[in-house]
Every structure is written in structure tokens, then in C-alpha cells.
Amino acid sequence: MEIIRKNPDNLPTPLAAYSQVVKAGNIITTAGFIATNQNGDLVGEGDIQEQTRQSIGNMIKALESVDSCLENVIKVTVYLSDMSFYKQMNEVYNEYFEKIKPARATVEGKLVLPTLLFEIDAIAVC
């Protein structure tokens, strides 16, 4: 089975040894995506909705780099720094996932930087 491991050029370079997206056969997994732009700068400090949009946008870029798309996502995990952001996050999340409705888990926890409010990873099929 061919395994493709990618760090797409249109996303910031990871600071650790990992791939942002891996395609193994017809399974695609992503790393956790946060609200950074291509230069690695945080987008939407203090704004859960802007961070959600940017993070999902980054995940879409990763999926597209292995010839996939959001419609192929079957499972996501959402990480929130505080569950008080749940409702506002969900408003933006639903803009992307309302029609495809992948399975989802939502977890509260400390993220890698104190300014991060949201992170998302996914499993997709092709």
C-alpha cells in the first residue's frame, strides 16, 4: 500500500517531526490544525469564530493536497480551550459541516499555546 505523507507548501511548516496530512490507501488522516496563516502567525487572537474558520480552512488545504475535500471527512475531533466557546464555535463549524455531518468528538483541554482557543483534526476517505 502506498503511503503519502505531506506538509503542503500553502501551510506553515510544522515545528516538530510530523506530517500535516497522511494518505494510506483510501484513508486520510490529518494532524491537528490551529488558526495560523501561511507565515505561522496566529489569526483571530481572542476570537473563537475567526480561529475556527482559519483552522478549518487550513484543514481543507491539507485535504486538497492529497486530492480530497471536506465532503470526504467521516470523523473530526474538536479541541476547545474552554467549553464556554462551544456555542460560538458550533455556529462556524456548522457553516462547513451542516450537510455532511461527520462523527465528532469535542474535548476541552489546554492547547499548545495559551492564545489558541480551537484545534481540529479529521479522518477522511477517498
Image: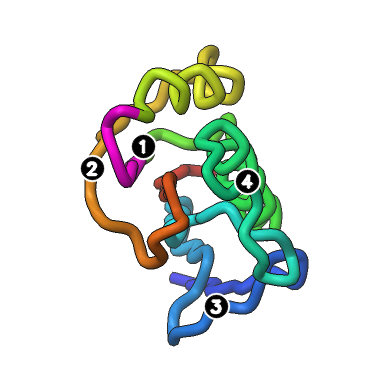
Q: Quadrant of the N terminus?
A: bottom left
Q: Position of residue 48 (x, y in %)?
A: 50, 36
Residue at which label 3 appears: 14
Label 4 vs label 2: CA separation? 19 Å
**Residue 24: percent from the left, percent from the top?**
45, 63
Residue 64, above or below 24: above
Residue for badge 1: 75
Of discs 3 and 1, which sits in the foreground?
3
Q: What secondary structure is marked by label 4?
A: loop
How packed mark 4 is, by other alpha carbons closer than 10 Å (few <14, some 14-19, many 20 or more), is: some
Left or right, residue 105 beside residue 10: left
Reading the chain from its start, which is encountered first: label 3 or label 1? 3
**Residue 18, quarter of picture:** bottom left
Residue in the picture at 74% in, 65% down: 38
Q: Is residue 28 left or right of residue 47?
A: left
Q: Nearer the viewer, mark 4 or mark 2?
A: 4
Mark sitting earlier along the chain (2/3) = 3
Q: Which numbered circle lies on residue 44?
A: 4
User: For the residues marked 1 and 4, what is the alpha-carbon distance in whole angstroms?
Assistant: 25 Å
Viewer-nearest of labels 2 and 1?
2
Residue 53 vs 6, above or below: the answer is: above
Residue 79 falls within the magenta-colored stretch: yes
Question: Where, by quadrant of the figure, is residue 80 drawn?
Answer: top left
Q: Which residues are magenta?
A: 77-84
Any mark on residue 108, and which?
A: 2
- Residue furthest to the top in view is 99
Q: Nearer the viewer, mark 4 or mark 3?
A: 4
Q: Earlier in the sequence, mark 4 or mark 3?
A: 3
Residue at 60% x, 19% y is: 95
Amino acid at dot 3: Pro
Residue nearer the viewer, 86 or 21:
86
- Badge 1 element: strand
